[in-house]
């Protein structure tokens, strides 16, 4: 498969040719090495970033004016011609936020338990590695900022892996 063109020349004006690497990795389904490559169906269809991010938002900060390209349910409905797509994206984002709301505190609890655990050095080292891996994945989903809109199936796979790593880490420090 050919490399996807994820930006237009308009984006390179500000980004100097650099893409949003976290968003691109989520969209292309390549963010987590130990998971199977799972690109979003829109990525597979060749939809570039500006295919969805077509609304312009002007942000003024003092004398600086920034232009941002934003997206939302309106773009899904416009292309697909079905109002249900607006509900779909909202439910994906709600489910992602709910999982993040559960996993964040669970991971923080594991990280706290690591500090006072009486587990063996080997178990503690394994648990720390699992917690670090879970933190990296969780932070990646948060930094993507789309709450699943860029690739909901893949984001759920990542969050399932985070849960697995947290549970394995907890079992090692109990």
Image: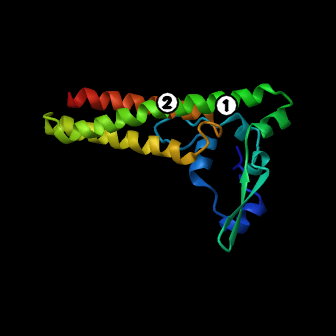
Relative to the observer, which residue lies in front, 140 or 78? 78
Q: In this view, does 62 lie above or below 55?
A: below
Relative to the observer, which residue lies in front, 154 or 93? 93
Residue plotted at (81% across, 27% down):
83
Residue plotted at (64% across, 58% down):
19
Residue 20 picture location, percent across and down: 61, 55
Crowding near the residue tagged with mark 2, few <14, some 14–19, many ≥20 C-alpha atoms within 10 Å: some
Q: Quadrant of the N terminus?
A: top right
Residue 126 visible in the current orientation: no
Q: Which residue lies furthest to the front in this view?
A: 62
Residue 120 picture location, percent across and down: 13, 35
Q: Is mark 2 on a helix, strand or loop?
A: helix
Q: In which quarter of the image is residue 76?
A: top right
Label 2 sits on residue: 99
* Residue 90 image label: 1
Q: What element carries label 1?
A: helix
């Amino acid at each position: 498969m050919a490399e996807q063109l994820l930006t237009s020349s308009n984006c390179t004006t500000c980004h100097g040719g650099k893409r949003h690497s976290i968003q691109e990795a989520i969209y292309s389904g390549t963010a987590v090495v130990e998971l199977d490559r799972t690109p979003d169906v829109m990525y597979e269809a060749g939809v570039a970033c500006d295919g969805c991010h077509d609304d312009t938002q002007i942000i003024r900060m003092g004398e600086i004016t920034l232009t941002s390209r934003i997206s939302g349910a309106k773009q899904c409905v416009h292309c697909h011609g079905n109002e249900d797509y607006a509900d779909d994206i909202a439910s994906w984002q709600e489910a992602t936020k709910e999982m993040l709301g559960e996993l964040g505190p669970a991971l923080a609890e594991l990280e706290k338990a690591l500090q006072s655990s009486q587990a063996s050095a080997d178990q503690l080292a394994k648990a720390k590695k699992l917690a670090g891996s879970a933190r990296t994945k969780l932070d990646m989903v948060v930094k993507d900022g789309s709450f699943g809109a860029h690739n909901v199936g893949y984001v759920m796979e990542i969050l399932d892996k985070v849960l697995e790593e947290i549970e394995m880490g907890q079992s090692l420090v109990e």
